[in-house]
Image (tube, rainbow, N blue to C red):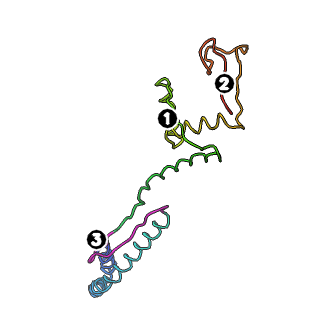
Amino acid sequence: MDITPYVDSLRRDLLAAAESAGEEARQIAERLGYALDPSARLALMEAISQAASEITAAMPAGSVDVRLDGRDLDFVVQAPQATAPAPPLPPPPPAPPVPGDEEGLARITVRMPESIKVKADEAAAAAGQSLNTWLVNLVRSATSDHAIHVDVDLSSVPFGGDFPFGKRGNRRVTGWL
């Protein structure tokens, strides 16, 4: 920012005020104008620096700095940097094995419809586990001594056509808690 026009305006105003007092007053005002040039520049720079400080204080983040470049002022605006989204939380650790439950490993083959496998893959990924680990934990929960098997017949309950637990005629809900 070039502050010379502002200092020149101050000098012109001083000369205009002295014009009515005669030639001698005009010459004194002209000399005073040149003598006041450094002081006027310094006063303007201090006022602008104070304004930048107040702007910085009002900003939630970032800053505004004023720097002297020769006879000009430069403004340096440091905008807040965009923050990266927080990384997702790590998946929960797999359930610890039940003591004495892991004597040996058995390999089995499970055949299931592709649509169920896709849903199982999605559920395992959401849990942060491999499909194998997810299935082992599911079977472990279902066969635990504390597992409760639920088998509810809802055929006598009058549901509308949007029954969420199965197709027509199949009004039974089963699972483990």
Q: Mark 3 points at which residue?
A: 2
The picture places residue 170, in percent across and down from the top left corner, at 63, 15
Instruction: Give the class, few, some or many, for how many residues have Cα within 10 Å of label 1's Cα (few <14, many ≥20).
Output: some
Determine the residue positioned at 70% across, 35% down.
147
**Would you identify the image quadrant in which residue 13 lies?**
bottom left
Residue type at mark 3 is Asp
Judged left or right of residue 5, residue 154 is: right
Image quadrant where residue 143 sits: top right
Which of pointers 3 and 2 lies earlier in the amino acid sequence? Answer: 3
Looking at the image, the residue that sits furthest to the top is 169
Establish if 8 lies above or below 136.
below
Q: Which residue is drawn at 35% across and 83% down?
A: 39
The reply to whether callout 3 and callout 2 are in contact (CB within 8 Å) is: no
Q: Where's residue 172, x and y in %?
A: 67, 19
Q: How far apart are marks 3 and 2 (CA)?
A: 80 Å
**Badge 1 amino acid:** Glu
Disc ID at residue 122: 1
Q: How far apart are labels 2 and 1 at the CA level?
A: 21 Å
Please tell me which residue is depicted at 36% across the width and 72% down the height of the picture.
66
Q: Tell me the residue that label 2 is attached to.
A: 174
| Residue extent of the magenta highlight | 59-74
Q: Distance between the residues labelled 1 and 3?
A: 63 Å
* Residue type at the position of mark 2: Thr
In the image, is 139 to the left or to the right of 120?
right
